[in-house]
Image (cartoon, rainbow, N blue to C red):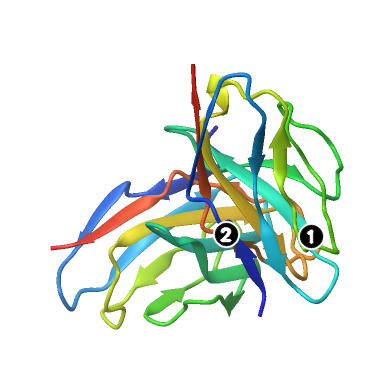
Amino acid sequence: DGGITQSPKYLFRKEGQNVTLSCEQNLNHDAMYWYRQDPGQGLRLIYYSQIVNDFQKGDIAEGYSVSREKKESFPLTVTSAQKNPTAFYLCASSSRTGSNQPQHFGDGTRLSIL
Amino acid sequence: AQRVTQPEKLLSVFKGAPVELKCNYSYSGSPELFWYVQYSRQRLQLLLRHISRESIKGFTADLNKGETSFHLKKPFAQEEDSAMYYCALSPLGDKLIFGTGTRLQVFP
């Protein structure tokens, strides 16, 4: 089931460093999403993109940035402005927004602070 | 505010017992609701959505607009049902709002 590939599986960040999490999909989906998962808090939406070269902030966008230069790729950068970046990050995609198509998820990236 | 509440962090039952995972939502419009499941060492995946009104792996969920609930039910739990279950709300079809999840443990 290679539809959505997230890399790396584990990532460590030093203080003041920006790190980028990769998300690639080969499902030809228009919409892509980034979630953050913390213990006891479920999944919270960071950013989402409905189409190439366009994206919207989710509920917790501060300290994060994204780009959507290609349909199949939606990388997430965790900047030094994110003071509590330690979490599990999930990427998802769906065929199109506005139609309640199910979201397909990757395996996730676990980010920790050194 | 749009919100999904799953009041139980953990639900433990014995095999063959009925299961009900609770989900309540807060949304003023007509909601689209989903249940997602994550089995051990697997990806988060869609279990069912209310618009389909279908039964998946013996699970059903009925939208109750009066009680703003979308509880997940199964009459006879199986050990392979043990997993993490998330209820999710899609207000406008463009994003999902997840609950905090309920871990279901089914003992033999």
Relative to B53, residue A63 above or below = below
Q: Which mark is residue B99?
A: 2
Contact (CB < 8 A) between labels 2 and 1? no
Q: Secondary structure at mark 1?
A: strand
Q: Is residue A27 visible?
A: no
Q: Residues within 10 Å of mark 2 (few under 14, many from 20)?
A: many
Quadrant (top left, top right, bottom left, bottom right) of the N terminus of chain A: top right
Q: Position of residue A100 (x, y in %)?
A: 77, 57
The residue type indicated by label 1 comes to Glu
* Residue named by callout 1: B32
Residue B96 image offset from top left, x and y in percent: 65, 63
Q: Is residue B87 left or right of residue A2?
A: right
- Residue B71 in sight in this render: yes
Sequence-first disc among 2 and 1: 1
Count the numbered circles shown. 2
Q: Residue at x 85, y 64 (%)?
A: B66
Residue type, label 2: Gly
Asked if badges 2 and 1 are on one and the same chain, I answer yes
